[in-house]
Structure formats: C-alpha cells, structure tokens
Amino acid sequence: MDNRFLPVKITEHKNKGKLGGFLSINVFPGEYCEKMKENKSSICNQCYGYYMLNRYPRLKKALRFNSEVLSTRVLTSSECKALEKKINGKKNLVGLRFNSIGELINDYHVLNLQNIAYEIDPVIPITLWTKRPDLLFKVLDKPLFKVVQSHKILNQFLFPEDCDDRVQHTFNVFDDETKMKDAMDFVELCDRKCIECHGKCNECMICYSHIDSTEPRYAIFELTKRAQRKKAKTNICPECQSDKVEPSWGTTGYMQCNNCGKEY
C-alpha cells in the first residue's frame, strides 16, 4: 500500500545508511524533546533528528501527521492490519524500529506501538529506543518489542542491569572519545558487556535480535556526529586528496569530502 494511504507514515531507510534495510515509525520531536534539547548537558542538545527534519520538509510533515494520529486515539484493528501488510510485505526487510526520530508522547502512543507490533510477523525484529521507560512500563506490562533505554545525559552511561528487567540494552552517547573509552574500560572491569556503535545496524543486529531473557545485556556506546567530524579531520579524500572531510550527514557510516563532494 502507498504510504499516502496508510494511517501512519512509515520511513524506509536507504540501503547504505545506518538503518539500511530497515523500516521505522517515527514522530515529530514534541514537548518532551524540546525541553530536553534546552539542556546543554543532555544528548538531546545534539539531536540529529532536528537536522533531518530541517533537511527534509516532507519528513517533517509526515512526522507531524504521525504525532497527531498516534497520540490522540487508538488505531483501529483494520488500521493496524494495513500497517502490517505494508511492513510484512517489504522484501528483504531487516527489522522495524520505533522512534529513530522522536520520543514516546503519551499512553495512546505506547498502546498504538504495542498494537502495531502485535500484527507484525514474529520473524521481524522490532526495537523501541526511549528515554521514557517510566511512561512505557506504566502502560505496558510486557512489550511485544525489544526496548533499548537511552541515557539522557551526554558523557554518562547506564548499566542495563540497573534498569528495569524489561530493558534489554542501554544506549549511551559521548562527545569525548577518551571519556567514552574510559567508560567502556570500566564496564569491562565490572565484568559487564559493552560495545561501540559504528552505525551499521544490519551487520551488528545486537539491538534488533529477538526478545530473549537469556541474551546478554549490553551497554552500547556511540560518539556524537560532531565528535566524529572532529576525529575525521585526519582523513584524506581518495578522490581529490583533500583533508576537508567529515562523516556524511546523509549516510551513516560514510565520509563526505567538502572539497569535491565525494561520499565514500
């Protein structure tokens, strides 16, 4: 079914991007996101979602639409089945992500995600990223999707074992590589598991494996785009040999030359 006729707009990610092969259901960054963004110590202060919305006006319109629908009423069974048909019918689908942009809004939003997940083929992994586990678990006793809890504060981390048992992993963002490496060393000294995110979800899949209570729980670490650009200053463009390169804003995991425009 064409996205124009769906009750909720589904984002299809480019194959060479971070979420290549994935679909996602997202919402516009709302009141919670705006308040978090004002806090300079928050990871939301460097949110890539705002960049994406400013770059792609149609995406902004679609996510405003999603926010309105998902937060004001419960989707009907037929509406959930229409989404199921679109998602289950996607060839070579790697997985489904809830909230690659945006955050949980209210009880309606949580219930709608649960009802959508209920309709999806169980072979398709589904994961929600959230900074609001309190809202999530107030509404749901047993989510039908994997939960990754994002730490709200930059350059700090959470052990997943210190979170609700229904949280599988934590996602921790740093803008200082030295601090991040020190934190990862500490996690390992505590005999806990951690991994650095390199923006290639379809190759890693730790965040997207199916719900399994015996699965190891990971503290996942990632550098901000700004920190990645700073680190990239030593890179050289293979096309023109310029050192004016930075991580591509359009394609995660790729570099882009600001001199000749080559993406590699």
Image: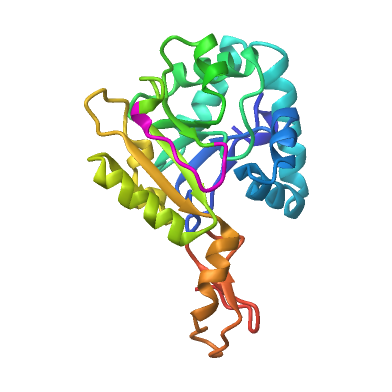
Relative vertical location of residue 43 with respect to residue 5 in this rendering, above or below: below
**Left or right of 199 in this view: 4:** right
Q: Residue at x 50, y 84 (%)?
A: 236
x and y percent of residue 244 in the render? 61, 81
Res 124 → quadrant: top left
Magenta-span inclusion, residue 49: no
Q: Which residues are magenta?
A: 152-161
Q: From this view, report whether residue 87 is shown above or below residue 232.
A: above
Quadrant of residue 69 within the rendered picture:
top right
- Which percent across, then down, holds residue 63? 71, 35
Which secondary structure class fits the magenta region best?
loop
Q: Residue at x 64, y 45 (%)?
A: 41
Q: Give residue 138's position: percent from left, percent from top.
A: 53, 10
Q: Residue at x 72, y 47 (%)?
A: 53
> Which image quadrant: the N terminus?
top right
The front one of 194 and 184 is 184
